[in-house]
Amino acid sequence: MRARTNIIFAFAFVVALLFNSFAGAAETFSVTVPASTEVTMQDPNAVIPFTVTNNTGSTKYIREITFRIDDTKYNFSTATVPPSGWCIREAEPDRITFALMQGSGACSNGSSASQLAPGGSLVFNITMLSLAASADVAGDTLTSVTVDTQGGFSRSGALPTWTRRSFEPTLVATPESLGVGGTITLTMQVTNRSTATQSNITSTPTPPTPSSAIATLSEGPYYGSTALDGNHSASATVITVASTTGFTSPGAIRIDSEDICYTGMTATTFTGVTRGCNLTTAAAHTTGAVVYAKTQYSLTAGQTGVIIWLYSVTSTGTVYFTTRATNSGSTANSVLLNSNTVLIGNFTASITVTPESVITGQSVTVEMEVKNNGASALINLAPSALTQCAGGATETLLSGPSPSSISSLGSGSTGVFSWTYTITGSIGQAYCLSGYGTASGGATTNTATSNSGAISQYSATVAPSVIASGTANKTLTWSVYNGGACTLKKIEISFPGGGGNWTCSSVGPPAGWTSSCNADKVSFKSSSSANDIPSGGTKSFSITYSTTETVISDKVVAFPVIPSPRSGCNGSEAEIGTYVTVTAYGLSLAHSPIGPVYADGSATYTMTATLVSGATPVAGKTVTFSTTSGTLSPATAVTDANGEATVALIAPNSTTDTTATVTASYLNSSGTDIVSFTGWNKANIQYWGSLSPASASCGSTVSFTMVLKNISATTSMTPNTASYFAFNDSSAGGSNVFQAYLNSAVTLSAGATQTLVFGSPTSSGGGGGVAIPSSFLTGTYSPTLNSAPPPASGLFLTDGGTNDQYRTVTDTVTISGDCGAVNVYIIEWHEFR
């Protein structure tokens, strides 16, 4: 009996051992990252998505996990945003621990609904600063990942690996919309973030791969650009430009279709030139022409260069480009990246929603930009009703569209419609909208879909989001929105890590809050619950920096924001990432006249953007313009030797006073300007298309017909025979004017459309046609209004003084014959009232 008892005891002991062994082995987890994960050296905001899987067969939940890394290669960042329901319990350069957010607001390993169950996976997006090396580093990894408080867990599989890249790139395609037959300029900005000099910078693949065959390479690669200063003959032996910064000597440049080789250069000239080299033909070039560099360059540590390609487009659709920067031996590369998407079509639309993170009940602004890339004016433009995208959130229209329509949009011009929507839903649900634009004659844009936003418990935005390098005494303002059930008593804003020169000099707390400058962060604290940020409320917090970071290439820096709820409410803290781009370029925007001008659909502001690097003007760069009201003609312009790029802003139609915010952008730099318009309450006659003839010969006698519409809802007008249509060749160097008076008075009732004939040589009317001067220079002209003739241009409509108005004709007139040879000149006259 005793022997039997011993046998049974021994068997039970073995079974227990086996059970404990198997049970322990079953508690396993794995850690992975997506294939081909890459980060950029010295990027303080590099994010690696680590997927942690509590493997099938585990019997325990993961409630706390620690990641460790070699801090001679990487530093974990406090800007890391934990998964929903999780929090950061500890963050040091070499380790970061995540735990569960408790109902009390504590961060611990206590049980909660967000714990990682057996068979489940969770992504931890960890922000880290990757330190520099002399070249790319493959096979970077963590030193360990451990589940700290649930005993018996072990990691299965190897730790994940990724690659550290040497170059920081941006890839921008402009313009964002163009017609078939147009040219896309693709610019890659490359910054050497490694510790060594990298030679013969290029791209791979080269040229960058378009996503569609509708775009084909026409020129490039080029390795820099500037602007020609002054007219140059085909035999000029010195080429004068705005600046030779970024060019290599000796080398070669490209102007129009000519290559010019050179052996020396100064700050503004190329010397020792050979004209028409590389089997090209020497030619004359006019001031302001873009000068491209054809010679590859090297980049020392921290230095920045550009590569430029030109692509022609052959059919409608969308296209983006893919490439990476590389050196001559492919030992230093950038991450693989895609450019923005370009729309190709005669009539295009794009939609943006801002902001991209809101609390439920917060409003967003939606803007649809429409562009006329065709040869003729578009008439009576209007947006469709916007439809919701799948995402879960509910978008409720509050107001808009504003304006409800645009009367006319000339070739190359852009207009904008805006709406305000309220977003409601649960945390994590997404919102976006789609729609299209229409115009008379059945013209319809592509169906555009906006960017996507998401509802969060808290949200924070910072303004401005872009500042110039080394800006002194710069104030940043954060708007913090509370979508939680508890009031918020503290807002902590941390300064960027990874170097920089951010010196807090003063703070601006809201009423009832206190704060002071510290070395690395500012804590704003509410003095009482009555002054907290209420549920559904918002408050603004400002920090002024006496010094900011100085960069030689654009850099995104993080300002983590931590809202803290008042205790006793079971609220939770969260960390929100807010970001500011420090740009190596400065971009300012100004307007003339001082204004206001009338909101009559024709009055014009000249918008001038000035691009500088430090205090030096930057020439030969394409600046993109946008506006919240009115239309732009054109929407892009190239900077001249003074760093200036100029476009026209045409007034909206409005019976009340209004404003427009105009933005100019180059890469990450931008500048804004606000202009004012006075409401127009008279009859409002607008060009409504059908200009005929569209072309004529100099010396011939012609009458022009066109359709006009009175868009006023209340006031009629009868233009008399002193009204005229005119265009001139003064901008082409000529002194000729064609001016034809209205044949007979025509009444345009409120809302009415009429065809008018301008074919009288005098204000007496009667018709008979008007001769185009035989000396009129040939070319294509846009009859843009001039409210202060001479020379006459556009439409002048008069009924004797009550409703007098100058208007632009948004179609063009081509003059041919043996009178001269001029290409295309756009007459731009500005209305001063």
Image (cartoon, rainbow, N blue to C red):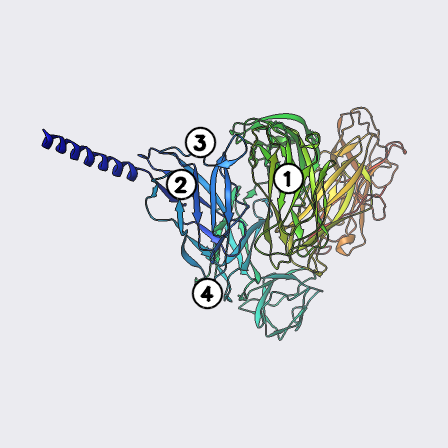
Residue 701 horizontal side relative to residue 799, left or right: left
Provide the residue designation for mark 1.
Answer: 491
Q: CA distance from mark 4 to mark 3?
A: 55 Å
Give residue 665's position: percent from left, percent from top. Answer: 65, 49
User: Disc 3 designates what residue?
Assistant: 111
- Residue count near mark 1 (Cα–Cα under 10 Å), binned few <14, some 14–19, many ≥20: many
Residue that badge 4 annotates: 328
The amino acid type of the residue labelled 3 equals: Ser
* Residues at marks 1 and 2, CA–CA distance in whole angstroms: 31 Å
Asked whether 87 or 287 is in front, the reply is: 87
Residue 41 position within the rendered picture, expressed as x and y whole percent measured from the top left? 50, 56
Between circles 3 and 2, the one closer to the viewer is: 3
Instruction: Give the Cα separation between the discs numbered 3 and 1.
Output: 27 Å
Going by the image, does 463 lie left or right of 329?
Answer: right
Dots 4, 2 in contact, CB < 8 A: no
Q: Which is more N-terminal, label 2 or label 1? A: 2
Q: Quadrant of the N terminus?
A: top left
The answer to whether residue 227 of the structure is visible from this angle is yes
Nearer-N-terminus badge (3/2): 2
